[in-house]
Image (spheres, helix red, strand yellow):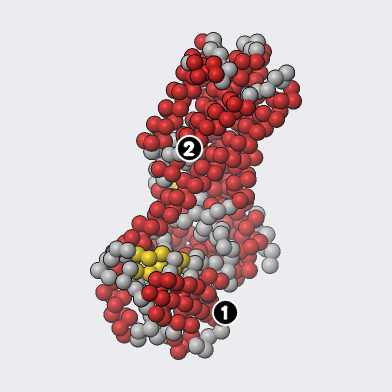
Amino acid sequence: KETAREAIRLLREAGVELKILTGDNELVTRKVCEHLGFEIKGILLGSEIEHMHDDALARAVEEVKVFCRVSPAQKNRIINALRANGHVVGFLGDGINDAPSLKNADVGISVNNAVDIAKEAADIILLENDLTILHDGIFEGRKTFSNTMKYILMAISSNFGNMFSVAIGSLFLPFLPMIPTQILLNNLLYDLTQTTVPLDEVDREYLEKPKRWDMFFIRRFMVIFGPISSLFDFLTYFIMLLVFKAAEPLFQTAWFLESLLTQTLVVFIIRTRRFPFYRSRPSKALISTSASIIVFALALPYTWLGTVFRFVQPPIQFYLALAAIISAYLILVEAAKGWFYRKYGHRLEQMLMPSRGIGLYLSRTMRVTQDIIAMIYLRDENEIPINSLISDLEHAVSYPISPEEIYRSLQYLRKANLVSINWHEGKIRREKAMKDYVEKYVFSELWPNILDDWRSISIFLKARYGKINQEYHQTA
């Protein structure tokens, strides 16, 4: 394809690892790779694969990028080996011999002019003669996942908080905090603001690397941010009962407004791990729908429709209290969000915690990342010069590693909040989240795969510096 060279470049930049599986001979494949700018890191022939055990092949597929003279059955073995190692595998093919592999891969991709059997076996068919669509599709998938996560986090935290508030309020109040029709209206208006979440802008870190689905992260988010919402609901209860001496209609009107406005505005904080608006701009559609619902809600008690839902006009002083409550709530949520992502943000990173689990062998990128974590964690000092880290890694690991790979992994660890980097001083500081990640994940699920690397790095650091981090406990 004419667009193959550009597609390879874009996919590589997007963090997609590419491999070539072909029935052609080695010389033809080398020539095509050179023309496309595809970097060849090892070539494995079908005749060699024929005599390899599955464990040996599982190791080879992490190191080799080009497989020549392979049969359809051998293509399937390669795909199975990659999947066993924890990878999500996509396969692009258009011939009869590609049909089994298209069916076996996680995502089978074919083209519009492929043979019928290949198109039947594929999950996706490219209608245009342009392979850069693959890159666009991956980015759209990452955007969809990001916006889906936003909605889930918003919904579970607000619903859990509202449920808790209603349950507690019903125990102590002489009347319902909100009547059923008011609750339904509240939910309807809130859901209208969320209809534009799929159109929202997505932060760059969600596009650069794929994120993972993690139920622990979602549950922990719910039990932390849900009660924060309830805390300010209870504050509203207290103010309306003790300060405004509110009767049932005024109390219900006040909590309706506080509940709806806090839910609507907190979306702009929860939708990003960055500082809202200044470092992460929401879409115009999300801003417009949210602003419209807020204006409608504030005007509702003064309309005939408000009387239908048994709302009354609050006193002017209430709006001052409402503004103070909302401001305090948003400030607290922003502070809690920063703490939450520092502690649990790494759980969304595929490179740190693969969603499919750990396979027989780590990919090279993941192994480099884990060895950098080991080096930073085992060094005795809290602040480590970057040049010193690079030098230690080049001497300690058993495979060639470039400074560019190290810098890319450091940026990744920084975005996962495992380290902080002072580029001006050229130093790295390990964060508390790294200790939590190492002790709860590395020393358990990852340990069989990286034990040897940790031992060799530990021995190297003891020989060079005479000591290692005292928090490290050898578990092997």
Q: Position of residue 189 (x, y in %)?
A: 50, 30
Q: Where is residue 24 in the image (x, y as percent from the top left)?
A: 35, 84
Look at the image and tell me whether residue 172 can be seen: yes
Residue 71: x %, y % from top left: 44, 84
Of 370 and 247, nearer the camera is: 247
The residue identified by callout 2 is 194
Q: Tell me the number on the disc at residue 55.
A: 1
In the rendered image of this protein, does residue 44 appear above or below residue 164? below
| Residue pictured at 65% horizontal, 12% vertical | 247
Q: Nearer the viewer, residue 174 or 208?
A: 174
> In the depicted view, which residue is nearer to us: 288 or 320?
288
Q: Which quadrant is home to the C terminus?
A: bottom right
Residue 110 place in picture, x, y as percent = 38, 69
- 471 in relation to 261, above or below: below
Q: In which quarter of the image is residue 227?
A: top right
Question: Which amino acid type corresponds to the residue marked 1 in the rendered image?
Answer: Asp
Q: Residue at x 46, y 75 (%)?
A: 101
- Of residues 213 and 100, the one nearer the viewer is 100
Type of amino acid under label 2: Gln
Q: Residue at x 42, y 27 (%)?
A: 292
